[in-house]
Image (cartoon, helix red, strand yellow):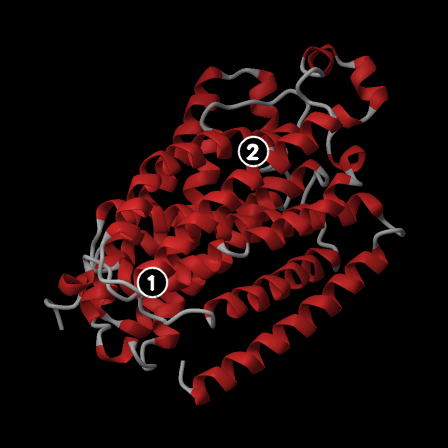
Amino acid sequence: MNQALLARVNRIQLIALVLGVGALVATFAGGPGNPRQFFFSYLFAWLFWLGLSLGCFVLAMIHLLTGGRWGYPTRRFLEAGYLVLPLMLVLLIPVFFGLDQLYPWARAAEVASEKALQQRHAYSNGAGYIGRQLFFLAVWILMAACLRAWSLRQDATADAAPSRKARTLSGPGIVIYGLLGTFAAVDWIMSLEKHWYSTMFGVIVLIGHILVAYVFSVVLVVLFRRQEPLRDVVRPTHFYQLGNLLLAFVMFWTYVSFGQLLIIYSGDLPHELAWYLHRIAGTWRYVIGGVALFHFFLPFFLLLFRAVKHNVPAMFVLSAMLFLTHIVDTYWLVMPTLHTQGVAVSWMDFTAPIGVGGLWVSYFLWRLKAAPLLPQHDPGLQFAFVYGH
């Protein structure tokens, strides 16, 4: 980074850090007065920002396997995003102190009165939950560290061996991400409910991670496109390709989300329908209506047009809209368990994501400054900017 850009990034990093710490302090200060609301708000905030890191992680591996010009301008943004995972491990610790506020399997009285909870107790218990989360995050952090080390090693040599190692890890890495992420989604969100289960749910959550990482990378490429070295290589073609991929994952996310709803609606089983019934109860119906409009219908319609995908400001606005809508979607997945009759917004629903997000952005920018904005000596780099204007 040049000195002017570095100074701006340092300033934004400091602002994000101060804002994040201040918002988290306020959130923790409000916790004793309403502990259940605090833990639900904090879990929602942590899940969204963790999902962004995991989305960057799997998206980087997808590019390492498939190539494509779209990935080279975004590579270092994705790397900095998944390098925030150690921070997310630290920020998970408060959740461990509120398991009985969040999960029915952590409340002895409910376990004693519910046969379903008793049957799952060998798996769903405090020690098992904590152990699994530490294991999941440790595996992801280790894999992310290897990918980053090989990426930096490739910057220093023309030998393609580091890239080959990263590609070799990325194949099984995507499988490991899907497998562990499915179990994690059950722990994080599905087990908030006593009886509900869905084999499609983990896929919905994981595709959401990839989708939000795509829109995040588009936003950052737009913001940094006039800075060296991206200024000399980023073309409308890159936004067109990113727009095509964004359209694909918007459709994929909608397909699995609607598929789950259709199967549960067709089955008409009370223990399955209950999850949806209090997520469309009262004012929650307006929330899911907004998610349907801004997370599928509007972006799907706009991304069908080539002109929109070539238009940089349009792609920026569309990506920012999807980013904000995905925050609402994460809120809708978590919060109706607490407020079953309708939306009941707490001030902690704002301070928690701002607090976690401020720390995330600050850590992200710190990692972003540690390497050039464009990868060096990658074997595919010679073809990445040859075509398109």
Choose between 380 and 68: the one closer to the eye: 380
Choose between 155 and 349: the one closer to the eye: 155
Tell me the SS state at disc 1: helix
Q: Residue at x 55, y 51 (%)?
A: 85
Residue under circle 1?
74
Image quadrant occupied by the N terminus: bottom left
Image quadrant occupied by the C terminus: bottom left
Residue 74, quarter of the rendered image: bottom left
Residue 96, quarter of the rendered image: top right
Residue under circle 2?
184
Where in the figure is residue 336, as x and y percent of width and height? Answer: 66, 39
Q: Residue at x 72, y 67 (%)?
A: 21
Where in the figure is residue 129, as x and y percent of width and height? Answer: 68, 30
Is 115 left, or right, of 204 in this rendering?
A: right
Choose between 94 and 165: the one closer to the eye: 165
Q: Residue at x 59, y 52 (%)?
A: 86
On screen, 11 above or below 384? below
On screen, 15 above or below 384? below
Q: Residue at x 62, y 31 (%)?
A: 132
Circle 2: is it few (<14), some (14-19), or many (20+) Cα within 10 Å?
A: many
